[in-house]
Image (cartoon, helix red, strand yellow):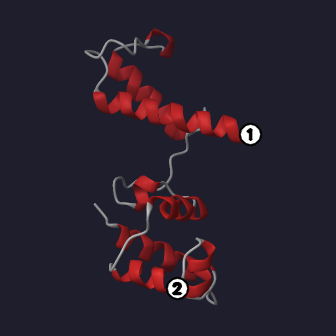
């Protein structure tokens, strides 16, 4: 898995690819950091706090899990009907051995793996946030 250092370097390279004139100072400012903080992150000398991670992720349209190297999925597209939403729903149905989402019994832990339940709860939380923002 990648580290935060690798991911922030990738975001910095992508920012330079989009805008060859961007400076480290401007990139850092876009995420609410100083140039000194950014240079530390790029070199692996430090990492941002949780609030800063949220800003970096939001500004760069990536998930915090991706940013910290917990997943290789850059951004979860969790809107109902999105490919990720549909894929996770299919995985849950398969895991539960049902053909319809309405047949899923979330309380039968013998049918649904812990990992799948965690994905479902993450999707639910994300959807709640999206609904609240609308």
Q: Distance between the residues labelled 1 and 2?
A: 34 Å
Dot placed on the residue nearer the N-terminal end, 1 or 2: 2
For image coordinates 59% across by 35% down, the residue present is 127
Q: Give the answer, above or below, for where 47 lies relative to 86.
A: below
Pointer 1 residue: 134
State the residue in front, 81 or 126. Answer: 126
Q: Give the answer, above or below, for where 66 lies relative to 10.
A: above
State the residue in front, 57 or 1. Answer: 57
Q: Where residue 17 is drawn, which disc sits there?
A: none
For image coordinates 48% across by 14% down, the residue present is 100
State the residue in front, 97 or 74. Answer: 74
Q: In this view, does 19 lie to the left or right of 67?
A: right
Image quarter hosting the N terminus = bottom left
Q: Is mark 2 on a helix, strand or loop?
A: helix
Q: Give the answer, above or below, for where 9 lies relative to 68.
A: below
**Which residue is at the far left?**
110
Pointer 2 residue: 35
Q: What element carries label 1?
A: loop
For image coordinates 44% across by 14% down, the residue present is 99
Mark whose residue sits in front, 1 or 2: 2
Q: Give the answer, above or below, for where 84 lies relative to 3.
A: above
Whole-percent x and y of residue 76?
50, 46
For image coordinates 41% across by 53% down, the residue present is 65
Whole-percent x and y of residue 34?
54, 81
Image quarter hosting the C terminus = top right
Whole-percent x and y of residue 101?
49, 16
Q: How crowded is mark 1: few (under 14 residues within 10 Å), some or many (20 or more)?
A: few
Quarter where residue 10 is shown = bottom left
Q: Residues within 10 Å of mark 2 (few under 14, many from 20)?
A: some
């Amino acid at each position: 898995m990648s580290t935060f250092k690798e991911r922030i370097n990738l975001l910095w390279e992508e920012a330079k690819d989009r805008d060859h004139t961007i400076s480290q100072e401007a990139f850092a400012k876009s995420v609410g950091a100083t140039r000194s903080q950014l240079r530390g992150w790029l070199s692996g000398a430090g990492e941002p706090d949780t609030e800063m991670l949220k800003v970096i992720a939001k500004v760069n349209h990536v998930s915090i899990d991706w940013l910290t190297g917990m997943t290789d999925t850059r951004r979860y597209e969790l809107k109902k009907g999105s490919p990720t939403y549909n894929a996770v729903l299919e995985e849950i149905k398969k895991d539960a051995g049902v053909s319809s989402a309405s047949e899923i019994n979330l309380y039968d832990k013998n049918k649904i793996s812990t990992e799948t339940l965690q994905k479902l709860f993450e999707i639910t939380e994300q959807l709640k946030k999206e609904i609240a923002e609308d």
